[in-house]
Every structure is written in structure tokens, then in C-alpha cells.
Image (tube, helix red, strand yellow):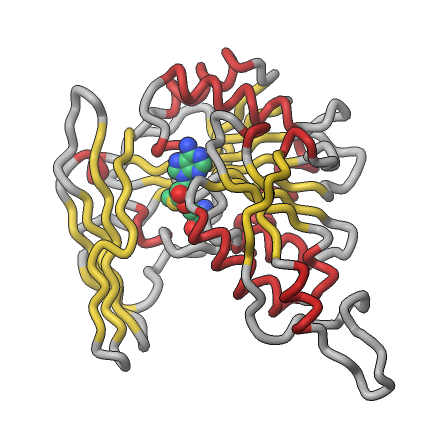
Amino acid sequence: MNAILWMQSPKGDISYLQKFFLMYVGGRLPLHLQEDFCGTALLSVEWLHSDARRTAVGLDLDAEALNWCMENNMNKIGADVNSRISLFHGNVLQPLECRLVNLDPHEIIENIKIDDEGESKTSSLNSTIQGSPKAVCQTKLMKDTKLPARDIVCAFNYSCCCLHSRKELVLYFKHALNALSTKGGIFVMDLYGGSSSECELRMQRRFPNFTYTWEQAEFDIIQRKTRISLHFNLHKQHKKIRHAFSYSWRLWSLPEIKESLEEAGFRSVHFWIRNMPDSEEIRCMDGFPVGRDLKYEEVTSFQQQDSWNAYIVGVA
Ligand SMILES: C[S@@+](CC[C@H](N)C(=O)[O-])C[C@H]1O[C@@H](n2cnc3c(N)ncnc32)[C@H](O)[C@@H]1O
């Protein structure tokens, strides 16, 4: 199964997001992104990198991951980015009640870099905040925050599998649709599947500095649920981190997603799929597998394989 691609590939995701937007909406460039289930918001940060007009909204239940993003990613990419990204802590099922996370303004002031002429650099595009200012959760809610209507809302790394009932899934899709611009927009999520995704499975990937293991517990066919755990072995530090991430997932089928998107009000739904290497071949391997660069293709029919990966696009 596609655990091999668990490791995020924000550049690849963004190029598909742009392609889908131009194909199904068109007429303008997508500038405003919402990354739901954003974790450390790596995709949002990459999105902001490529065009100074872009904005991003990130939303996640995990305050620690959001804080990590604020404290580590923000200062690397320049102070101006802080004004273009809004991270919210809370539940995707109640987005308007989510709370804004921000860098502590006192810490920003303390960490402003002063240039040779004695001028503060926080307003310049290339300025950086020095050190790691602390992130704080504000009392401001999303419903009280002025945000541009989103061109694209996305939910990657199989995050919709964190929602376990159809009722929750449809409710979430309704919120995604509400966030999209009335001028047109898309919702994009990913999903994996194949015969190898419905059984116990353990796969290792070895990189020069670390090895990581994807462990898939037994698959319950009544609830269509499994538990996914990711373990890391850091070679230099001689450190093993078991269960670095662990999720209880419901593995949705493609028609369930399509019907739920339609029920939520999306006008059309499109599937883009690529075949993945057989799990038997990649149980233990070095680096990225052959076929990692295989392209996704739009399909209306696809025969079951050992392993596949899909983007699903809902057009508002
Ligand atoms: C599979 S991880 C993906 C994280 C991130 N997109 C990435 O690629 O690293 C799922 C994320 O969804 C978050 N999450 C799960 N249920 C959620 C919910 N109901 N509302 C908001 N975030 C949720 C978790 O905290 C976790 O960060």
C-alpha cells in the first residue's frame, strides 16, 4: 500500500492542486488555500513560498503540531509570511469555533533582527525572526477572523480516514464547501486502497539518517477500521521513537467519498488514481521506490490492484 508515500511531498501536491484548479475552475490563479488536518502545515508553508500574493489557512486538533509549525517553520521563511498564514486550533467539524494560533507579539519584538542601518527588518520580505518565539493560542475564533474566500480546500495524508462516520464525513464536506469562494473553487483529498490495505502489514523504509516503519494493524471488515502507527529509528542519535504517530482510521471507499461529496453539495467529483508498487516488493527497502514519479490519471473506472493512491476532487 501507499504508506511509502506517507512522507509528505508538498511540491507534488501543490502542482496537482494548481492543475485541478485550472482544469475544473479556471479563469484565475488560485491564491487562497485552506489546509485542513494540517498538522505542522508543511503544505501551507510551501504554498506561501511560491507566490507573495498567496495566503493559507491551516486547521488541526493537535495544538503541539501547530505550535511546532509556528515556532520552527515561520521564522525560517520570513516575517511577512506570518501575515499571510492563519493557523487555527480545533475540530474540522466545527471550523468557525476554532481558535487562532499566533506567535506571541512580545517574543516577536524581542526577536526582531535589526539590520546594519539600525532599521527593523520585520516588515521586509526577506526578513527573518531570530530564535524561536513561542506560539500562543488566542481567544479569537475563526468566525471572528476576516479571511479571504478560499480557492482550494485540501485534506491530505489520508486525513479524512480520521472521521469515522458518514454523518461526520458529510458534515465536514459541507464545511469545506462553505469555505470555498462563490466564484468557484475545489476541495481535494487523498485516499489509498488496494487488496494489501485491508490486512495486517508492516513496511520499512531506510534512508541515510533514519529508518521508518509503517505498521498497519488488523483490518476490521465490519467497521472498515484499522490502526496505523509510524515508528522512527534515528541512526546517528541511536534513538528509536515507537508510535511517533498513531491513528485510528476508517478506510473509506471511493464511491462512499463521491456520494458524500455530492450529498454535501459539490457539483461534480473526479478521481485521479495511480497504481503503486506491490507491498510484497517494498516490505523493506532503501529510499524511495521505483514508480514514485508515476503520474496520476483521471479515471472513471479502475480495476482493483495490490495498492493504489488517489486524489479526489470535488468541484464547488
Ligand atoms: C494523518 S495526519 C496528517 C497531518 C498532516 N496533514 C501531515 O501530512 O503531516 C492527521 C491530522 O489530522 C488531525 N485531526 C484528526 N482529526 C481531526 C479533526 N476532527 N479536526 C481537526 N484535525 C484533526 C490530527 O491531529 C493530525 O494532525
Q: Nearer the viewer, residue 92 or 2?
A: 92
Q: How many numbered marks have been drawn onto this rendered protein structure? A: 0
| 64 left or right of 178 in image | left
| 249 left or right of 274 in image | left
Q: Residue at x 33, y 20 (%)?
A: 165
Image quadrant where residue 98 sits: top right
In the image, residue 216 sits, relative to residue 165, either above or below, namely below
Query: Which residue occupies the extreme bottom position in the image?
Result: 116
| 250 left or right of 178 in image | left
* Quarter containing the N terminus: top left
Residue 206 rendering spot, x and y as whole percentages:
26, 68
Residue 71 rendering spot, x and y as whole percentages:
54, 63
Image quadrant where residue 177 sits: top right
Query: Which residue occupies the extreme top position in the image?
Result: 263
Residue 160 rendering spot, x and y as whole percentages:
40, 32
Q: Residue at x 25, y 64 (%)?
A: 232
Residue 299 in view of the camera: yes
* Quarter containing the C terminus: top right
Q: Nearer the viewer, residue 60 or 223?
A: 60
The quadrant of the picture showing ligand 1 is: top left
Residue 310 in view of the camera: no
In the image, residue 126 sits, relative to residue 204, either above or below, namely below
Q: Residue at x 84, y 83 (%)?
A: 118
Q: Residue at x 71, y 68 (%)?
A: 109
Image quadrant where residue 307 sits: top left
In the image, residue 182 sits, relative to residue 44, either above or below, namely above
Q: Nearer the viewer, residue 280 or 47?
A: 47
